Amino acid sequence: MTTDPNDRERARGEEPMTPEVAEEGAPSADTGGGVSIGRMTGGAVAGGYRATAEDRSERVGSWEVPAGTDVPPPFASPPSSGVGIGTMAGGAVAAGREAKAVDASRRMLSASPELVGSLEVLRSQLPLLVRTQDDGIDEVVGQLAAIEGQIANGGQTERHRLERLRTLLTGGGTVAGGLASALAVVQSITQMLG
């Protein structure tokens, strides 16, 4: 037994959602929403009618495409209302009718010895700072604890945590950013993230 995908909408008194085809081989009025990708090494993609794409992966290491890898370009002109992507190394893309994309992936990076050492030095120097209200140190301490906890549990940490710590130390919102050890942490993070 087959069921018409429009039965649900009709039962609720709604307009059917499935695109109709005018005649065999002819495109429907609901064309578009195509996705063209030259190279895809991770992530999720959906296009058209009830499109949805969700990436909940946990990836370890770099998300970069190796240097020197030939990447075919996307079509010069993606389909109407479509998306053209040269290289996709994670995330989620949806295009077209009822499109929805969710990137809930976790990007884990192996902690370098330089990062681990610079985090330890920074943590040891934080108590030497004169504390004031709204000095931003509590948030730095929180990020340090989260990063160090992840590293202790598996030698890896989430990319977004490293990005947040780097932003805290370079954004001028904390006195900790003036420490030489903070500069070493920022350099280690930048080297890891590229």
Image: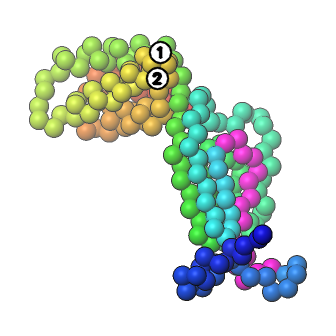
Q: State whether residue 15 is above or below residue 38.
A: below
Report the span colored magenta.
27-42
Classify mark 1: residues with Cα within 10 Å, few (<14), some (14-19) or many (20+). some
Q: Determine the residue positioned at 85% across, 81% down.
A: 26
User: Label for residue 114?
Assistant: 1
Quarter of the view holding residue 74: bottom right
Residue 143 location (% of width, % of height):
33, 30
Tell me which label, 1 or 2, sits earlier in the chain.
1
User: Farthest residue toward the front?
Assistant: 1
Classify mark 2: residues with Cα within 10 Å, few (<14), some (14-19) or many (20+). many
Q: Determine the residue positioned at 67% across, 42% down.
A: 42
Give the camera-side residue of 115 and 103: 103
Q: State whether residue 174 is above or below residue 49.
A: above
What is the three-letter code of the residue carrying label 1? Answer: Glu
Residue 71 location (% of width, % of height):
78, 45
Disc 2, SS: helix
Quarter of the view holding residue 70: top right
Quadrant containing the C terminus in the rendered view: top right
Q: Is residue 58 left or right of residue 131?
A: right
Give the camera-side residue of 14 and 23: 14
